[in-house]
Image (spheres, rainbow, N blue to C red):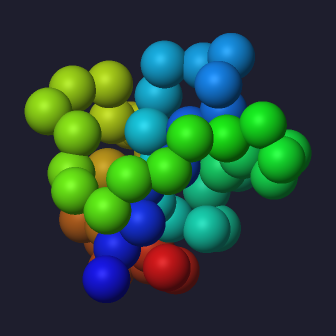
Amino acid sequence: MIMYVKDKKSNKWHWCENCSNYPTSYNVETRSTKPNSDLCDECKAKEKAGECRQ
């Protein structure tokens, strides 16, 4: 199952653990359903290229 995470101070959702902006702090929100907006462009590109590590 894909987990979407975002830093509470950010509005971008991430799902590729190898994204350079993937939140590593303990101050994160998580969800198991895909958000309708505010998806990380780098995560989208990594997923499209088959380089997304989840």
Can the viewer see residue 37?
yes
Quadrant of the rendered structure where residue 6 is? top right
Work out which residue is located at the far left of the displayed protein and give it. 36
Q: Pick the residue in front: 37 or 28.
A: 28
Which quarter of the rendered picture does the N terminus lie within? bottom left
Residue 52: percent from the left, percent from the top? 44, 74
Q: Is residue 36 left or right of residue 6?
A: left
Note whether 52 is above or below 28 in the view shown: below
Q: Residue 29 location, x and y as percent?
A: 56, 41
**Residue at horizontal 50 percent and vertical 50 percent from the top:** 30
Is any atom of residue 45 visible in this view? no
Residue beneath the point at 44% across and 39% down = 13
Q: Residue furthest right?
A: 25
Horizontal side of 1 relative to 3 (left or right) equals left
When asked about the image quadrant of residue 35, the answer is: top left
Task: Using residue 45 as the reference point, say whether residue 52 is left or right of it.
Answer: right
Q: Position of residue 22 (x, y in %)?
A: 66, 50
The residue that appears at 85% across and 45% down in the rendered structure is 25
The image shows residue 44, relative to residue 18, as above or below, that is above
Residue at the spot 38% in from the left edge and 53% down from the top edge: 31
Number of numbered markers: 0
